[in-house]
Image (spheres, helix red, strand yellow):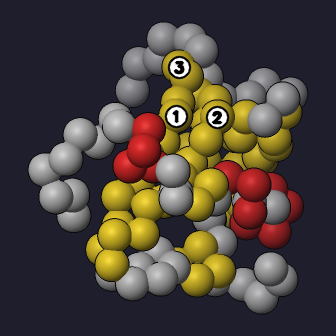
Amino acid sequence: MQFSRTLFHNIEVLEVTGKGTLTRSAAATTGEDVNDPARWAKAISVLPLVDTKRDAINGKWEVKDGALTGSGGVVAIRIPFRPPEEYDCRVGVVRRKKTHF
């Protein structure tokens, strides 16, 4: 099985106003430095919420060594979290191999 060339190591949501909620039961930036670790101290890591079997929309997904990866051409996965009205999102991605679209 061949998996995609992109690994997602973390996906975090920082609630700026309001409160996010899980989308299944079970569980604007202000001009400040977006890379400041203190700014992200209260961020919610949503990657651990993903269930690759339940949340896959297209393609085959797996989590291996803490990274989310998908295979099967154009892939899509649902993150079971509804963010508040205003939020910032930070995604850590590694491109494993050069691709051309």
Q: Which residue is the site of mark 2? A: 9
Left or right of 101? Residue 96 is right
99 to 3, vertically: above or below: above
Distance in Å between CA atoms under marks 1 and 2: 5 Å
Q: Which residue is the site of mark 1? A: 92
> Which dot, 3 or 1, sits closer to the camera?
1
Q: Are marks 1 and 2 in contact (CB under 8 Å)?
A: yes
66 to 82, vertically: above or below: above
Q: Nearer the viewer, residue 18 or 5?
A: 18
Element type at marker 1?
strand
Earlier residue among tags 3 and 2: 2
Earlier residue among tags 1 and 2: 2
Whether residue 23 is visible to the viewer of this picture, yes or no, is yes
Query: Which residue corresponds to the image point at 74% horizontal and 63% vertical from the top-left?
Result: 49
The spot of residue 44 in percent (x, y) is: 58, 60
Q: Which residue is the site of mark 3? A: 95
Amino acid under label 2?
Answer: His
The spot of residue 78 in percent (x, y) is: 62, 65
Q: Nearer the viewer, residue 34 or 49?
A: 34
Query: Which residue corresponds to the image point at 81% horizontal and 69% vertical from the top-left?
Result: 54
